Amino acid sequence: MLQLSAFLAKESSWPWTIANTVDTDLISLLTFAAVTVIVGVVLLLLSELLGPRRRDPQKDSVYECGVPLLDDAREPFTVKFYLVAILFILFDIETVFLLPYAVVYKQLGIVGLIEMGAFLFVLTGGLIYLWTRGALEWD
Amino acid sequence: MELTISGAEILAILPAAILVVTGLVQLFADLGRSAEDKHSEKTHLAMIGVTGFLLAFAALFVQGSGASAGELYAGAMTDDLFGRMGAGVVIMTGLFSTLMAGSYLASRGSNSAEFTALISFGAGSMALLCQATNLISIFVAIETLSLAVYVMAGYFKDERAASEGAFKYFVLGAFSSGFLLLGMAFIYGATGGSVALTDIAASNGQQDTLFSVGTLLVLIGFAFKVGAVPFHSWVPDVYQGAPVVAVGWMAVAVKASSLFCLCRFLLFTGGGNDLAQLLAAISVVTILLGNLAALNQQSLKRMMAYSGIAHTGYLLIPLVVALSGDGSSSAASIPFYMFAYAATTLAAFGVLAAISVGSDRDQVHDLDGLAKNRPLLALGFTVALLSLAGIPLTAGFIGKLLILSNAIQQGFLLLALVGIIGSLISVYYYLRPVVSMWFREPKSSFELVPASWGITFTVALCGFATICFGLFPDWLIDLSKRSVEAILG
């Protein structure tokens, strides 16, 4: 290990100075990462090579909690769900901002109120916009 | 902890706030009827936009005029001259893009308020980006402007080229934002947890390798936004698919605001070890590849895309000079070049918008004989192309002169040589449309819808500004110098 770090430290040009400047502990971390990868790959390879393999139609079918399959799950679904998801995130963010604000609104004072007002103004504007454009109607 | 807000802080945020409100008003002004009349020009949107942009421009003059109150928003923003110049370029570009948008989109049957509103929203975030002085506000501003621009790139959503370009832009852009954010995290770590650029400059983490890696990653993020070479592959496809007006807007405003921010970032942080060499390499490759790839383009939009890449390369030269040693005042050529590039490029895209009204003409031979039918449009395009090529008496010439003379003075002979070679190559492809406009016979099928007042006004004013900056550059050069001195302190 010492030899390896000494070898790395000898290199002086730019990217290789990492080992030099950060810490020699990095070597043990790298070793750990390498061992992790090697163990994982070896185990996967062993089970691939040595494991018995008896296939039948029941085994190859998709597991649906024991319920017989109806049809393929990979079918296109309407883009409206996508819109709903986007709108959901929008109002999710509103909640994420409003809840912490509710905790500290006294400390933030009048400026905090104005800033929250500006935020809600833009968000409400967005709501009115998408409502009028019909984004909330399913059909 | 009582939140307080000073007058200078309100003034600093004012241009961006005005632009956001403008965008909202544009959306609401068109709300009831946008579904029906996508073929009408909707002058009211342009009027709202122009009012907003002029107000925001006026706000730039008001802010920073009082006694500087130290840090604004705990170091997240500044109101110095450099940032205001960047915001000025962006706001002017937004104004002209808004003027051109109505008639062009109406002729394509897809004029809706969203387009002009996106220009306003994007302009607001770009103004913030030019004035941002900490890593968080920089990142937020970049993301906001990117979202607006992604949508505009795919505005013709039924067209294949537009979808392809927008999708490439979006995926690669999201990826590059990841690099940007990781780089910022590294810088944050290397400098002991500072986000403000002044704190980063004051900390002693610049010699850290982690800091170099961080600035490198941030540079990758910015290089994507400005279209510098290893990260330029999206540019031609996006330019080809996007509406012409949006391309003009992207080519100028995104590049200007990103470069202003990159310049401020690098001047403050010093860039860490060896960044200057890397930037020099990027600059050389960008100039050469941009110009060489533009040589054989038949599509004017793709030609302008590669020409834009080449101009990014020229703009990186002063950054290289500024980063190495005592040449930091050479960054003064960046604001000037950006003004010159904005006027020139807007004039060029105004003409492209004018000839693609009605049908999507963007081949070089579509220009054949334009001078006989529309001499003024042809004149405007010629001035713009000559300025892009850097022919004397135009703004582009002065800009290149500043950049290259600074580089030579500071001893960057090879870099200047590459810039000169690039300019020489570029003359060929810039003159090709000029030849076809003035010396070819018009085609029989050439029917040109009269250009709208917005486009005519833009081409005339921007062409005029190109000549003006070329003939009387002194005041603008002086302003650029003072702005860079303001951030260097």
Image (cartoon, coloured by chain):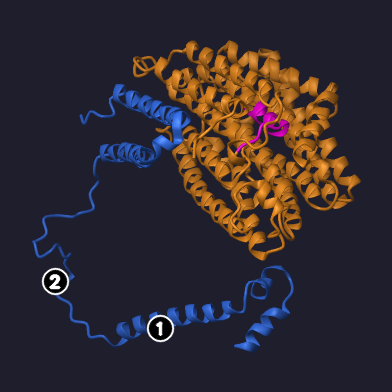
Crowding at label 2, few (<14), some or many (≥20) Cα neighbours within 10 Å? few
* A103 lies left or right of A16: left
Tags 2 and 1 touching, CB below 8 Å = no
Residue B202 in percent (x, y) is at: 71, 52
* A57 lies left or right of B448: left
Of labels 2 and 1, the one closer to you = 1
Q: Residue at x 14, y 71 (%)?
A: A57
Q: Say which residue label 1 marks.
A: A39
User: Which chain's residue wears label 1?
Assistant: A
Identify residue type, mark 2: Pro
Q: Which span of residues is magenta-colored?
A: B77-90
User: Which chain's residue wears label 2?
Assistant: A
Q: First in sequence: mark 2 or mark 1?
A: 1
Residue B102 in percent (x, y) is at: 51, 17
Question: Is-magenta flag for residue B81?
Answer: yes
Identify residue type, mark 1: Val
Which hue is chain B drawn in?
orange
Q: Residue at x 44, y 82 (%)?
A: A38
Q: Say which residue label 2 marks.
A: A57
Which hue is chain A drawn in?
blue
Give the image quarter of residue B113: top left
* B29 lies left or right of A20: left
